[in-house]
């Protein structure tokens, strides 16, 4: 495994991180309990030290499973978790994958932090992230004063923001990097989904902010496993992609297969990760691990050949010309 330093900190993050949502929810398929533990254990053995979770994943389970499986090796891990969703309110049931109510007032932030520390069975959180903040949260001075206090108290080492969930969020990302003391910003970035993340690269480098890049395989389109648009179960997070978007994505993938094969020394899924790591502003990439084969393949990307400047240039041309396809279709279906 290779590591990159989070700017402005002494934290060294593995270039491949572990997004705990795959083992804390059923959003990426039903993974047996024992296999969830094996994925976490094997990831750490392979050198993955960065684990990204959230208090809302499985209503706390995404933090509890980390403590249960890897708590005895806490000193080997860099743990990031997220806050901002009030899943403690049992009177407002969640429907499907719809967003829960958000709360960022000082009292709730302190409460959420204490609950995360308890579930993680630790006395500090390495990176504490605003979860999908909107502008009203990013502009909230009291929120960031509270985070500064938690940092001074030693309960969190650094804080950041995880942007999303839909592609957008440029204003929030720009403001939080330029006007708040965040050390990390989590983004969606892949060969097929580059905006608005591309605009963040110069800002992040100028402001000494590390970017954490999730969904590098664009809902598995860039894994090379599909030749036609798959059908996902209703509870699967990927089921919210429009079928038209998935079909179009696979047409685009046909044009980037030159990145993979024996002559390149990498698989397509590894090339997708290398595309993200080509950017120096990106500190770590968070693919979705659902089985041990994926874990070995994706972590193997760090030892695969880097993209050449020529390959990157060809990808830039494809992106600028929308892969020479017709008007793109919306990616998410309405719910």
Image (cartoon, rainbow, N blue to C red):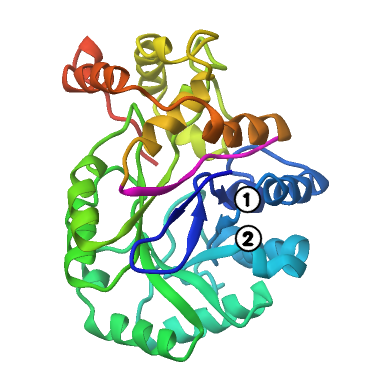
Is label 2 in contact with label 1 (beta carbons under 8 Å)?
yes
- Where is residue 69? Give x, y as percent: 77, 60
Q: Position of residue 57 (x, y in %)?
A: 57, 59
Q: Earlier in the sequence, mark 2 or mark 1?
A: 1
Instruction: Say above or below: 65 vs 276.
Output: below
Residue 294 picture quarter: top right
Give the residues in magenta. 281-291
Task: Indicate the quadrant containing the N terminus: top left, top right, bottom left or bottom right.
Answer: top right
Q: Which residue is the site of mark 1?
A: 25
Query: CA separation, marks 2 and 1?
Result: 8 Å
Which image quadrant is residue 278 in?
A: top left
Q: Position of residue 28 (x, y in %)?
A: 59, 39
Q: Which residue is mark 2?
A: 62
Q: Is residue 249 magenta?
A: no
Please give the name of the residue rendered at 25% of the width and 14% of the height, measured from the top-left corner.
323
Give the structural element (helix, strand or loop) at label 1: loop
Give 262 or 213, whichever is nearer the viewer.
262
Residue 335 point in image, percent of width and height: 40, 42
């Amino acid at each position: 495994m290779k590591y990159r330093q989070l700017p402005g900190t002494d934290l060294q993050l593995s270039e491949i991180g572990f997004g705990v949502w795959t083992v804390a929810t059923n959003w990426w398929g039903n993974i047996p309990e024992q296999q969830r533990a094996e994925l976490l254990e094997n990831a750490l053995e392979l050198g993955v030290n960065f684990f990204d979770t959230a208090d809302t994943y499985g209503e706390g389970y995404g933090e509890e499973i980390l403590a249960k499986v890897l708590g005895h090796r806490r000193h080997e891990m860099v743990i990031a978790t997220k806050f901002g969703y009030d899943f403690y309110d049992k009177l407002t049931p969640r429907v499907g994958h719809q967003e829960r109510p958000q709360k960022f007032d000082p009292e709730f932030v302190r409460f959420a932090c204490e609950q995360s520390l308890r579930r993680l069975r630790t006395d500090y959180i390495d990176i504490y992230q605003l979860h999908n903040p909107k502008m009203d949260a990013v502009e909230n001075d009291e929120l960031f004063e509270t985070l500064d206090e938690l940092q001074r108290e030693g309960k969190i080492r650094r804080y950041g923001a995880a942007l999303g969930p839909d592609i957008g969020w440029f204003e929030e990302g720009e403001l939080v990097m330029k006007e708040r003391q965040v050390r990390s910003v989590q983004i969606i970035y892949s060969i097929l989904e580059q905006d608005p993340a591309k605009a963040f690269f110069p800002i992040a480098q100028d402001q000494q902010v590390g970017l954490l890049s999730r969904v590098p395989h664009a809902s598995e389109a860039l894994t090379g496993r599909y030749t036609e648009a798959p059908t996902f179960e209703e509870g699967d997070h990927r089921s919210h992609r429009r079928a038209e978007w998935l079909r179009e994505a696979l047409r685009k993938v046909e044009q980037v297969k030159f990145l993979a094969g024996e002559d390149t020394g990498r698989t397509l899924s590894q090339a997708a990760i290398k595309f993200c790591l080509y950017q120096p502003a990106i500190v770590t990439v968070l693919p979705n691990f659902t089985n041990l084969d994926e874990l070995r393949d994706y972590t193997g990307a760090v030892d695969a050949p880097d993209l050449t400047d020529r390959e990157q240039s060809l990808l830039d041309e494809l992106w600028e010309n929308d892969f020479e396809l017709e008007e793109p279709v919306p990616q998410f279906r309405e719910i």
